[in-house]
Structure formats: structure tokens, C-alpha cells
Image (cartoon, helix red, strand yellow):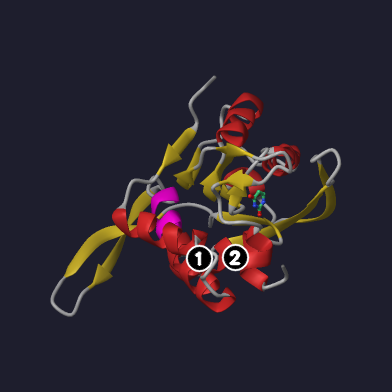
Amino acid sequence: MTQTLSVIDHPLIKHKVTLLRSKETSTGEFRRILREVSLLLAYDATRDLELSETEIETPLERGRFPILEGKKLCFVSILRAGNGLLDGMLDLVPSARVGFIGLYRDHKTLEAVEYYFKVPELLPERLVIVVDPMLATGHSAIAAITRLKKAGAKRIKFVCLVAAPEGAKAMADAHPDVPILAAALDRQLNEKGYILPGLGDAGDRIYGTA
Ligand code: URA
């Protein structure tokens, strides 16, 4: 198996993920902390963005300085839990383009079924960062990335909060060209496809719909 998963090793992220895991954490707190973690994830996911130079004048002198090069990057949120990661990422990159993919998980087969797809134009020229908090079986992420490739995306990264080994392996098998960035790698899936120890249903935790 190609190793495509990187787990961020940072004390602030570890601390915040522990707070997210706790069932005592309220909906409001969960959203706030997730926003902070996603900003940190976006910081790491964008570290290889290309730069060019622009000439500007500081109050003291003229000079050439780095500036982001090329087409704006694009975040693609897998609805609905992906939106919980999106907000913090947009705090960091406010001018990014945003796409949405609606997939629901068939509770019997655990397969992903598409019900919505809307992405910005010029996808082939953009870095596309797909976001979904939980990489569990990997079915949704794999389906979303297959669909984005069909729509022309060429450079794709996948960013999640918690990955299960099963999902990371399935993703690496299906899309060995797509790096995965996670805040934590957990132990395993349970028989219902939930990540253990995990944090529960991310969508329910974000929106208080348990
Ligand atoms: N989706 C979730 O929200 N949580 C899990 O543990 C697995 C999939």
C-alpha cells in the first residue's frame, strides 16, 4: 500500500482533538474548537502552495516580495459535516473558491450515494482540498474524489480530523495520488462504521442533531 496519510504532530492540535472527543463538550464549544483545529489543518495543507514575487512599496522602500501564484485554491466540503471544517479554513484563506458534494451513507451497505455536486470552474488549474472530519470506511471520500477527478481536478488533497486505519488504506488503494492529512489516526471502525475511540457522529456533534 502507498503511504498517503500524514498525521499532524502538534500539541495544540492533540489537545483540541481531545476536547472534541469528550462527550462533555457542548455543541457550541465543539464548533468553536473544530474551527480552530481546521485553521491549523489548513495551515499545514497549504504549505506547498506556489509563490511568485510582486513589487510593492513599504512605508520605507520598494522591494519584491512573495505572493501566492496561480489560480485560487478550492476547498470542497463533503456535506454536511465537511462544513464544520470549511469555516476555519476560510478564515485562513478567505479568497478560496468553495465546492460542495452531497453524499449520504447508505446505512446498510455503508456505500456513498451522491445527491448534490457544485464546484467552481477551472478545477484542473486549482489545488483542490477536500474536507470531511471523519475518514471512516473511506467510501464517501473515495466517491467524492472519483467525482472530482471526473470533473477535471488534477491536484487533490484530502483533509480530515480523525482517520481510521481502514479508511486510510481504502483511500490509498483507490487514490494513491491523493495525500491525506489528519489531526489523529484512531484504532479501528466498529460494526456500524463508526471510528473508535473517535468522537461520535461529527455532523451531530457540529449541529446538535443527535
Ligand atoms: N462519521 C462520523 O461522523 N463519525 C464516525 O465515527 C464515522 C463516520
Q: Is residue 173 rendered to the left or right of residue 79? A: left
User: In which quadrant of the rendered image does the C terminus lie?
Assistant: bottom right
Label 2, label 1: how far apart the Cα atoms are: 7 Å
Please say if the residues under marks 2 and 1 sit with CB atoms less than 8 Å apart: yes
- Residue under pointer 2: 84
* Front residue of 165 and 73: 165
Q: Is residue 114 magenta?
A: no
- The residue at 67%/73% (across/down) is 208
Return the x and y of residue 160 as percentages of the image width and height.
Answer: 54, 49
Return the x and y of residue 7 as percentages of the image width and height.
Answer: 42, 42
- The residue at 74%/40% (across/down) is 143
Q: Which residues are magenta?
A: 40-45
Q: Main secondary structure of the magenta part?
A: helix
Cβ of disc 2 within 8 Å of ligand 1? no
Q: Most extreme residue toward the top, as rendered? A: 1
* Element assignment for label 1: helix
- The residue at 40%/47% (across/down) is 50
Is disc 2 surrounded by few (<14), some (14 to 19) or many (20+) residues within 10 Å?
Answer: many
- Residue under pointer 1: 34
Q: Is residue 143 rendered to the left or right of residue 47? A: right
Location of residue 64 with respect to 172 vertically, above or below: below
Q: Is residue 44 magenta?
A: yes
User: In which quadrant of the rendered image does the N terminus lie?
Assistant: top right
Is disc 1 surrounded by few (<14), some (14 to 19) or many (20+) residues within 10 Å?
Answer: many
Return the x and y of residue 115 as percentages of the image width and height.
Answer: 86, 54
Amino acid type, residue under disc 1 in the picture: Leu
